């Protein structure tokens, strides 16, 4: 008989480990980073994967200006997850990070510094200004690089790509000249989005929309001629606009030929023309009555209805014609033009005033009718010096985005009122309006000479399709082979749309339609910017013909100079050297505009993936150079699109096989983060408190395909999930402390429970692999967490801890358990490695300490698909369900403290149909005893407690004595 007072704790095989429960990530992670740097982890990984199947991810370049924000953290972490998981699968997946170093954001920062010093940028030598921009960009590249490294991102940090590197600038100008040599470049005057503050054209991706309140006015244009309806002569056509500053540049009026117009007579006898209908008239009256200086019934009563088509051939005079009788511009009659394709009665008066300088529809309609822009508004938004009305020198002059200048009491409205043409003016129209995302100032549409890539011109430098390729591929028909026009080379728009619709994979799928709709409706691509810091449009334009010089030998000299000296080679050049003896510099205009930065970044595939500077990015399988581009959803109008257009225009295909899009990071309440709102979160502060792995786990856990949130409470939840995972690994490390291969048990010899867990592992492994291939990291982490907590901690480990602690070391069941635990350890450590990069390394080194080794050099676990056993799974699903029922029945007694542990419970359970006997079920349910019964009932056992394993068994004679098993083990 054993001594009931003896202490048996030294005979229990409790897990032993130095792996701490408390992570202390913020302190540990920097040392791990330092060790990775020391052993050359990235380089060793590249060596280990050399010759394997390639997975080429191309990093979209962030701007090199300022510290990274929480959006950067999510973006770069997702990229790292993709690349690490592909490397873990055994693929050769390099990661070359990059930065966008040119353009307005950096220029703007240098100009801010100048303004603080009371310097005028225009008075600083251009070469000095560009040098300061380069220095500024270089500074922030270095800052951001360290911040990204601290996130645990594994990449070729010592050799990133920078768009300001000389070889990159040379590649960008090479790509430009490909368009030029193919005839896919032209200079034309079109209205483009223009920032008067930054004095440059802007791309759509550089614009954001904000709700504002604008001035709205109704203006009368007197009809002077109307051949099809002479009775309208002398009638005042009424237009409505929210851009009063465009009235001084008006050149025509547009009507709808199917619209019915109303002729209204006011008490004064004046007659007005506007779309017929009570709604239109009511809106006009409301605006009119809101003006204290207007006639209360200015629009009077409807006296006739006029079909729109009779306005064909009609003309009106500009409201300022009498004020400026000597002005050729203002005294010229304003024609009525058929604008049926865009003129509606949804808002306004059914008549639209046309200013071809400041609207796309205006420009197109006027151009089709021989009316050209007049370029009245200068780069800073002020009417030019020689303009008749409110020129720059006028004491009342102002900028066209100046609220006072264009307001209801400003000089434009004042002059219109004096001329008797202003019918209403109020500063109360609320609408969404485009702003520069950098300066936050309003932008305008402004017609200026710019360089464009045409979207709808045939790409004759690309091979045309054969008649067979043009056949009805999915319908079994064929085109008329004699109709050669069907076989013409496609346009840039057609090639891009075909790639979007039929070639490129989109994750999520809705990204396809978003990019498709943008390319379907986009205008020609504006390439030029009137700035200094960027790659120049390196062209010479013949002063006589207006055509750019297209000479491959000249282009070769330009490209060679760029390779040697970068973009400065153009700005500092003796251009006669480039032109050679064949051309005289005096005959050519040297273009000094720079390229849109979206063209810069759209060319990165050329100098990163194709140049050979990064040999591991080259592929020889004839596929598009990149397997994946990954950026935020805003890049459908930015980098995704510019890269697509650049590659389709020069190569005939997209630069990527797949596009993955993530949403925007919002604050905890779902609001957009903004410094002005004070709701931003600094990723560096989160890392310094919680560690980078917590931020990475958050990024992997959210549904990043949608807009998602972050906040203190959200991070607390992430930390709790992390803690549970960490404790699971701590248990395994402790339980495997002295495990060796000599203890390993063959799967066929294992108990059913162990084989069932291997079945579940095989299922989870297949699911995780699919998640990796789908870039579905949220489901990946949910599956992994559920397996670790529900299958392992709450079930398998819970059941087998008694076996681990109390069975003899050579007991077959214990050996089988530890064999499975070893398999689980190797698998789970690899599964978490792409996400919890620091913790996975700590876990691996805790069990297999080696300063020259890393978990990140390992490959995906070798999980045998033959472990799957559907019959066994069905059986154990039934058992688990029964076990859950027992646990739920015990819980009320635990809450009432009738029993303290499930070990004290005796359970009556209907055993019929349960595929195990009562004793086995008692062990699985961790209870004292189970008997067959008609329903589930729980009572406290009278059995005594074993002094070693603490189980309450009939064979234990008194509390503290040993059960039969423990007696054998102790003996």
Image: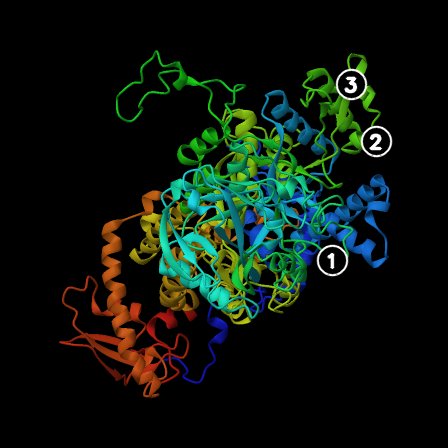
Tell me the SS state at disc 1: loop
Closer to the camera, 815 or 772? 772
Provide the residue designation for mark 1: 396
Q: In the image, what residue occupies the spot 29% across and 79% down?
A: 890
Q: Which mark is residue 212?
A: none
Closer to the camera, 216 or 325? 325
What is the C-alpha distance between the residues marked 1 and 3? 48 Å
Left or right relative to 554: residue 573 = right
Provide the residue designation for mark 2: 572
Q: Earlier in the sequence, mark 2 or mark 3?
A: 2
Provide the residue designation for mark 3: 579
Q: Residues within 10 Å of mark 3 (few under 14, many from 20)?
A: many
Left or right relative to 485: residue 404 = right
Q: Is residue 92 something one can see in this rendering?
A: no
Q: Residues within 10 Å of mark 1 (few under 14, many from 20)?
A: few
- Looking at the rendered image, the quarter that the C terminus falls into is bottom left
Tell me the SS state at disc 2: loop
Across and down, in percent, residue 43 comes to 65, 39
Asked which quadrant contains residue 414, the reply is: bottom right
Above or below: residue 903 compared with residue 789: below
Q: Could you tell me if the residues under marks 2 and 3 are in contact, i.e. CB atoms within 8 Å?
A: no
Across and down, in percent, residue 893 comes to 30, 84
Closer to the camera, 150 or 327? 327
């Amino acid at each position: 008989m054993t001594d009931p007072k003896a202490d048996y704790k030294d005979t229990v095989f409790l897990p032993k480990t130095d792996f701490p429960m408390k992570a202390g990530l913020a302190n540990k992670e920097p040392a791990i980073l330092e060790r990775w740097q020391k052993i050359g982890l990235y380089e060793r990984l590249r060596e280990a994967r050399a010759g394997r199947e390639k997975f080429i991810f191309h990093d979209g370049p962030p701007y090199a200006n300022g510290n990274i924000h929480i959006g950067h953290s999510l973006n770069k972490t997702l990229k790292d997850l993709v690349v690490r998981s592909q490397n873990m699968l055994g693929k050769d997946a390099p990661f070359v990070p990059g930065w966008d170093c040119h353009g307005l954001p950096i220029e703007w920062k240098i100009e801010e510094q100048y303004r603080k010093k009371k310097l005028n940028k225009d008075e600083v030598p251009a070469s000095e200004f560009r040098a300061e921009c380069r220095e500024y960009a270089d500074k922030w590249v270095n800052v951001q690089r360290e911040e990204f490294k601290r996130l645990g991102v594994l990449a070729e940090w010592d050799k990133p790509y920078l768009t300001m590197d000389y070889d990159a600038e040379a590649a960008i100008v090479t790509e430009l000249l490909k368009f030029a040599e193919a005839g896919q470049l032209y200079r034309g005057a079109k209205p483009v989005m223009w920032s008067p503050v930054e004095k440059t054209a802007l791309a759509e991706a550089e614009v954001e929309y904000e709700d504002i309140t604008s001035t709205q006015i109704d203006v009368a244009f007197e009809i002077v001629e109307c051949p099809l309806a002479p009775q309208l002569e002398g009638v005042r056509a009424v237009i409505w606009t929210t851009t009063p500053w465009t009235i001084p540049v008006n050149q025509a009026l547009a009507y709808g030929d199917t619209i019915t117009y109303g002729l209204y007579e006011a008490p004064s006898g004046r007659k007005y023309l506007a779309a017929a209908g009570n709604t239109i008239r009511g809106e006009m009256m409301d605006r009119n009555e809101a003006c204290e200086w207007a006639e209360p019934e200015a629009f009077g009563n409807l006296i006739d209805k006029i079909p729109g088509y009779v306005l064909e051939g009609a003309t009106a005079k500009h409201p300022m014609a009498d004020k400026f009788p000597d002005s050729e511009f203002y005294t010229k009659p304003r024609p009525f033009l058929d604008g049926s394709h865009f003129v509606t009665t949804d808002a306004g008066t059914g008549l639209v005033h046309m200013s071809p300088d400041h609207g796309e529809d205006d420009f197109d309609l006027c151009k089709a009718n021989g009316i050209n822009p007049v370029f009245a508004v200068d780069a800073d938004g002020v009417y030019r010096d020689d303009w008749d009305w409110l020129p720059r020198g006028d004491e009342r002059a102002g900028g066209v985005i100046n609220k006072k200048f264009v307001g209801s009491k400003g000089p434009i409205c004042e002059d219109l009122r004096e001329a008797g043409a202003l019918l209403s003016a109020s500063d109360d129209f609320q609408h969404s309006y485009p702003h520069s995302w950098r300066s936050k100032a309003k932008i305008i549409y402004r017609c200026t000479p710019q360089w464009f890539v045409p979207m709808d011109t045939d790409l004759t430098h690309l091979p045309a399709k054969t008649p067979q390729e043009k056949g009805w591929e999915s319908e079994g028909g064929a085109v008329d082979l004699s109709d050669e026009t069907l076989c013409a080379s496609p346009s840039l728009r057609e090639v891009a749309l075909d790639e979007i619709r039929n070639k490129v994979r989109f994750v999520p799928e809705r990204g396809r339609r978003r990019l498709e709709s943008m390319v379907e409706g986009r205008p020609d691509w504006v390439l030029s910017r009137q700035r200094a810091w960027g790659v120049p449009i390196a062209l010479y334009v013949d002063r006589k013909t207006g055509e750019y010089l297209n000479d491959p030998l000249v282009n070769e000299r330009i490209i060679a100079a760029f390779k040697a000296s970068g973009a400065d080679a153009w700005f500092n050049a003796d251009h006669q050297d480039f032109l050679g003896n064949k051309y005289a510099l005096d005959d050519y205009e040297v273009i000094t505009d720079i390229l849109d930065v979206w063209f810069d970044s759209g060319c990165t595939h050329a100098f990163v993936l194709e140049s050979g500077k990064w040999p591991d990015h080259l592929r020889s399988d004839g596929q598009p150079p990149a397997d994946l581009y990954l950026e935020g959803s805003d890049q459908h109008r930015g980098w995704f699109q510019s890269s697509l257009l650049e590659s389709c225009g020069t190569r005939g295909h997209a630069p990527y096989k797949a596009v993955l899009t993530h949403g925007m990071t919002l604050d905890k309440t779902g609001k957009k983060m903004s410094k002005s709102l004070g709701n931003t979160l600094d990723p560096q502060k989160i890392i310094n408190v919680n560690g980078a792995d917590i931020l990475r786990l958050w990024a992997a856990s959210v549904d990043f395909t949608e807009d998602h949130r972050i906040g203190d409470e959200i991070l607390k939840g992430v930390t709790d999930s992390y803690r549970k995972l960490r404790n699971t690994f701590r248990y395994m490390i402790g339980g495997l402390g002295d495990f060796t291969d000599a203890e390993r048990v063959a799967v066929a010899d294992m108990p059913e429970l162990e084989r069932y867990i291997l079945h579940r592992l095989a299922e989870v492994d297949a699911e995780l692999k699919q998640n990796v291939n789908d870039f579905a990291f949220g489901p990946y982490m949910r599956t992994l967490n559920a397996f670790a907590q529900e299958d392992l901690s709450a079930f398998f480990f819970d059941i087998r801890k008694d076996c681990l602690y109390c069975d003899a070391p050579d007991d077959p069941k214990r050996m089988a358990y530890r064999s499975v635990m070893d398999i689980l350890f190797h698998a789970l450590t690899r599964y978490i490695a792409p996400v919890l990069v620091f913790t996975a390394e700590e876990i691996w080194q805790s069990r297999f300490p080696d300063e020259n080794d890393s978990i990140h050099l390992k490959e995906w676990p070798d999980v045998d698909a033959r472990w799957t056993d559907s019959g066994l799974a069905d059986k154990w699903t039934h058992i688990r369900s029964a076990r859950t029922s027992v646990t739920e029945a015990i819980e009320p007694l635990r809450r009432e403290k009738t029993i303290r542990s499930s070990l004290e419970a005796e359970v009556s359970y209907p055993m019929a149909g349960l595929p195990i006997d009562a004793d086995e079920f008692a062990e699985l349910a961790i209870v004292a005893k189970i008997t067959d019964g008609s329903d589930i009932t729980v009572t406290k056992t009278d059995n005594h407690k074993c002094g070693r394993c603490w189980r309450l068994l009939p064979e234990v004679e008194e509390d503290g004595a040993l059960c039969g098993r423990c007696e054998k083990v102790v003996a």
